[in-house]
Amino acid sequence: VHYRVNPSHPGAQTQLSDSQVIAAVEQLAQTWHAADPSISFVDDGVTTDQPVNFNNVVGFSAAAGNAAANIPLNISPDGRTITGFDIQLAPAATWVWRPCDGASTPCDPYPGAGNDLGATLAHAWGHAIGLGDLPRADERLLTNSGGISAGPDCSSNGPVCRFAATLGLGDILGGRHLYPTTAPMPAIAYDQ
Ligand SMILES: [Zn+2]
């Protein structure tokens, strides 16, 4: 999965630096690689291109609409290959990020309000490799995003949730279904 990052976010409600944005994109790509080593991510560097037209750019774009992020995919005519994607992050959202891996650094909620960039990117990379959202709440609980909007310990107005920065069993099995591997299963930091 080749990608480039456009960290520019003029007017966005965030204190994150360009280097923090780039580091978050990289870290969450590596989270997926660790879960399924058959999926490799290649950082082709920083760009000023906008994340549009399936150019494999991760960046801030009003094209995200009302969502925190929007991830359009371009699919080959036979439906078997993703030929390009955009990861469009909403410039109007307040982005925050405290790196964590759930092992040496716990992904516990932290004070403040906003969208954890790591949690959003964990979810966004899942879409970029071809995974979909799950409609049922009990199935969604198997993924990194399960309960993020309804969890007891975080909300849009309370502490910032970041357990979703790690992958759930459903994410990992879904990735491994699409991109088989014989590598051992990774540790799952939070049983969701
Ligand atoms: Zn989604």
Image (cartoon, helix red, strand yellow):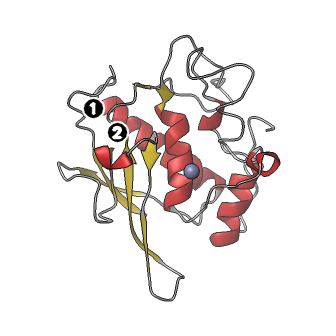
Q: Position of residue 140 (x, y in %)?
A: 74, 48
Position of 114 relative to 117 (above/below)? above
Extreme residue in the front direction: 66
Position of 13 relative to 91 (above/below)? above
Please name whichever residue, 160 or 35, is drawn nearer the observer in this view of the structure. 160
Residue at (59% x, 14% y) in the render: 158
Kindly indicate the quadrant of the structure image that contains residue 175: bottom right
Q: Which residue is mark 1?
A: 18
Tell me the quadrant of the picture where the C terminus can be found.
Answer: top right
Q: Position of residue 144 (x, y in %)?
A: 67, 43
Extreme residue in the left direction: 48
Q: Residues within 10 Å of mark 2 (few under 14, many from 20)?
A: some
Mark 1 beta carbon near ligand 1 (under 8 Å)? no
Identity, as a three-letter code, of the amino acid under mark 2: Ile
Asked if marks 1 and 2 touch (Cβ < 8 Å), the reply is yes
Tell me the quadrant of the picture where the N terminus can be found.
Answer: bottom left
Please name whichever residue, 184 or 175, is drawn nearer the observer in this view of the structure. 175
Looking at the image, residue 178 sits to the left or right of residue 188; the answer is left
Image disc number at residue 22: 2
Q: Residues within 10 Å of mark 1 (few under 14, many from 20)?
A: some
Kindly indicate the quadrant of the structure image that contains residue 71: bottom left
Identity, as a three-letter code, of the amino acid under mark 1: Asp
Please name whichever residue, 15 or 66, is drawn nearer the observer in this view of the structure. 66
The span from disc 1 to disc 2 (Cα, nearest Å) is 6 Å
Q: Position of residue 127 (x, y in %)?
A: 53, 58
Residue at (63% x, 55% y) in the render: 133
Extreme residue in the top direction: 111
Residue at (34% x, 60% y) in the render: 56
Residue at (53% x, 63% y) in the render: 129
Position of 32 relative to 165 (above/below)? below
**Residue 16 visible in the picture:** yes
Looking at the image, residue 93 sits to the left or right of residue 114; the answer is left
